[in-house]
Image (cartoon, helix red, strand yellow):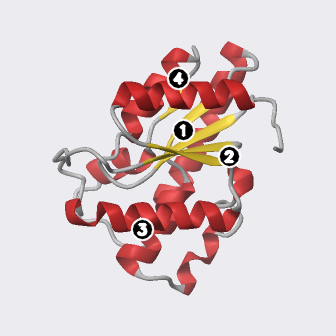
Amino acid sequence: MKQRKNLKIVVTGPESSGKTAMAESVAKHLDTVWSPEFARYYVAHLGRAYVRNDLKMIGLGQKKWEEWYARKAADLFSQKPLICDTDWTVLQIWEEYRFRPGDDFEWAKGYGTPENADFYLLCAPDFPWQPDPLREHPEERDTLFIMYENLLREWRAHFIILSGEHDSRVQTALATIRELF
C-alpha cells in the first residue's frame, strides 16, 4: 500500500450503519483524531433541501476538514493514523443513486480514488435503522451497501466489511489495522 506520513483510514457505508460510532471508537482505541462527516454539518445548517450542486460544496468541505484533521494528527500524534467518518465514496454513491450520474460531477475526478485512503472500513447495515432528520432511505440500505462495496472493488481499494454488534466491529477493525499497519 502507498504510505503517507500518516495513514488515512476511512469508515464508509450506507446511512445508519454505524459509521460515526465506528470512527470515534477506532480513533479512541488508537489514541488519535478523527475527521467528522462534513455533509452532516453542511446539510444541518443549509436551511433548505440539498440539491446536486451542494455535492461540490460538501466534497470541498470534506476535503478541507480531512486536511485540517490530518495536520492535527501529524502535529499531535506523529505517526498515528487519521480516521475519517466517510469521504468521497459517499458523494459518488449519492451522485449515482439520488441524482443519477451527470457531467457536472467531473469536478470530483481525482478526489474519489483508491489513493485517497490507505484503508476502508465498510460498515454493513445489519442492525435496526436509527431515525435521524438527515437520513433519507431506511428501506434502501442494502442496495446502497452493495453500491459501496462495488465502488471499493472497482477502485481495487483495500477494505474489510464490518458487520455484527458494535464492539465486535471495533475489535475486528483494530485487529485488521494492527495486522496491516
> Where in the figure is residue 32, as x and y percent of width and height?
58, 19
The residue sitting at 59% across, 48% down in the picture is 63
Query: Pointer 2: what residue?
Result: 117
Precedes in sequence: disc 1 or disc 2: 1
The answer to whether 103 is drawn above or below residue 25 in the figure is: below
Residue closest to the eye, 41 or 150: 150
**CA gap, disc 4 and disc 3:** 26 Å
- The local secondary structure at tag 2 comes to loop
The three-letter code of the residue at mark 2 reads Ala
Precedes in sequence: disc 4 or disc 3: 4
Query: Pointer 4: what residue?
Result: 27
113 with respect to 57 (left or right): right
The three-letter code of the residue at mark 3 reads Trp
The residue sitting at 67% across, 70% down in the picture is 109
- The local secondary structure at tag 3 comes to helix
The three-letter code of the residue at mark 1 reads Cys
Q: Is residue 67 visible?
A: yes
Labels 2 & 4 near each other (Cβ < 8 A): no
The answer to whether 148 is drawn above or below residue 170 in the figure is: below
Rendered image: mark on residue 94: 3
**CA gap, disc 1 and disc 2:** 9 Å
The three-letter code of the residue at mark 4 reads Ala
Query: Pointer 1: what residue?
Result: 84
> Where in the figure is residue 18, as x and y percent of width and height?
35, 40
Task: Examine the image and state in which quarter residue 174 appears.
Answer: top right
**CA gap, disc 1 and disc 4:** 9 Å
